[in-house]
Amino acid sequence: MVLVRMLAATVNPADINTIQGVYAVKPPLPSIPGNEGVGEVTEVGSEVGGNIKPGCRVIPRLNAWGTWRTHALAQYTDLIKIPSDVDLAMAATIAVNPGTAYRMLKDFVPLSTEDVVIQNGANSAVGQAVIQIAAALGLRTINVVRDRPEISELKQKLKNIGATVVVTEGELRKSEEVSALPKPTLALNCVSGRSGTEVLRQLASKGVMVTYGGMSRQPVTVPVGSLIFTDVALRGFWMTRWNKEHYNHPKRQQMLDDLFELVRCNKLKPPEHSFVPFDSYLEAIKNAMPKDGMLGKKQILVF
């Protein structure tokens, strides 16, 4: 067994949905919330093998492991050692959002340099990771966001981290910047509803749209013409399922190695975030809930 002192843990919408009982994961009660976080190993049992030792930083291999606690006792096989020199916010947020972005860019469409990817919810934590990873791979991105008073500042912020084009949902169809690019072969949808439909319309022939969220709480509606004349394909992605299917698979370690290499090269940074003392967890939960369909800063509990 391994004793872990938690350092930081994220508060993600999926954590809140799990508490509400509306998420696909329903852990047996009593249950400790929290899917994602980073801790430091303080003690190890005599039977512990591998490279996990006191002082190592670790993240959970399991979903619904329960990161919202000061300490945890775990099997060493349920932990993944990570580099100890990584920024605390990056270490705490590496698994879910950058992992989702990485897998969607790698697993659905064979992409090569200069190919185009389109996504909605581009200012979300996953969206920001998509922009940065895509830029590191030499891909171009069309990034769709909801209109808001500070839209110019948001557009510039996303371009500063590697976005090729940033448009609002209302600008998408008439944007000259969008029409000047080749049709995207991959679309990433976390909003669904009308936004998902508009993104789908932009796909090239035989393009693929991957849905990984439904922030609008509306279904994905597919134009018949997109199916018949463009022959698009619709897929879904859930990081929890992927992790379960690749619990101890080399692909998982390779993904983390690649992501941490991007971090070291300053090509992948954490999303805007706020550190919140664990005692103020109710504040973090409140601030992590979507407001008017939009998410604010990533909330990170610190212990």
Image (tube, helix red, strand yellow):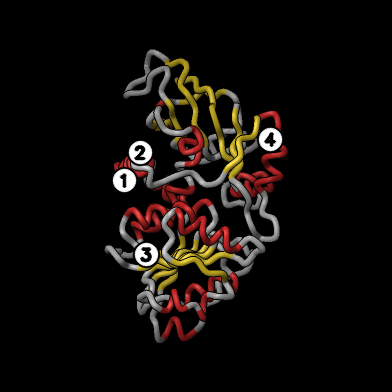
Q: Which residue is mark 3?
A: 140
Q: Work out which quarter of the rendered image holds the N terminus and state it.
A: top left
Please name the residue shown 57% across and 39% down the image: 10
Disc 1 residue type (three-letter): Lys
Disc 3 residue type (three-letter): Arg
Q: Secondary structure at mark 4?
A: helix
* Percent position of residue 88, x then y: 49, 32
Distance between the alpha carbons at the discs numbered 3 and 2: 22 Å
Q: Which residue is mark 2?
A: 264
The numbered mark at residue 281 is: 4
In the image, is residue 190 above or below residue 268? below
Q: Residues within 10 Å of mark 1 (few under 14, many from 20)?
A: few
Q: Does any portion of residue 210 appear in the rendered image?
A: yes
Q: Going by the image, does 39 lie left or right of 136?
A: right
**Mark 4 or 2: the one toward you:** 2
Q: Which residue is mark 1?
A: 251
Distance between the alpha carbons at the discs numbered 4 and 2: 30 Å
* Percent position of residue 49, x then y: 33, 21
Q: Secondary structure at mark 1?
A: helix
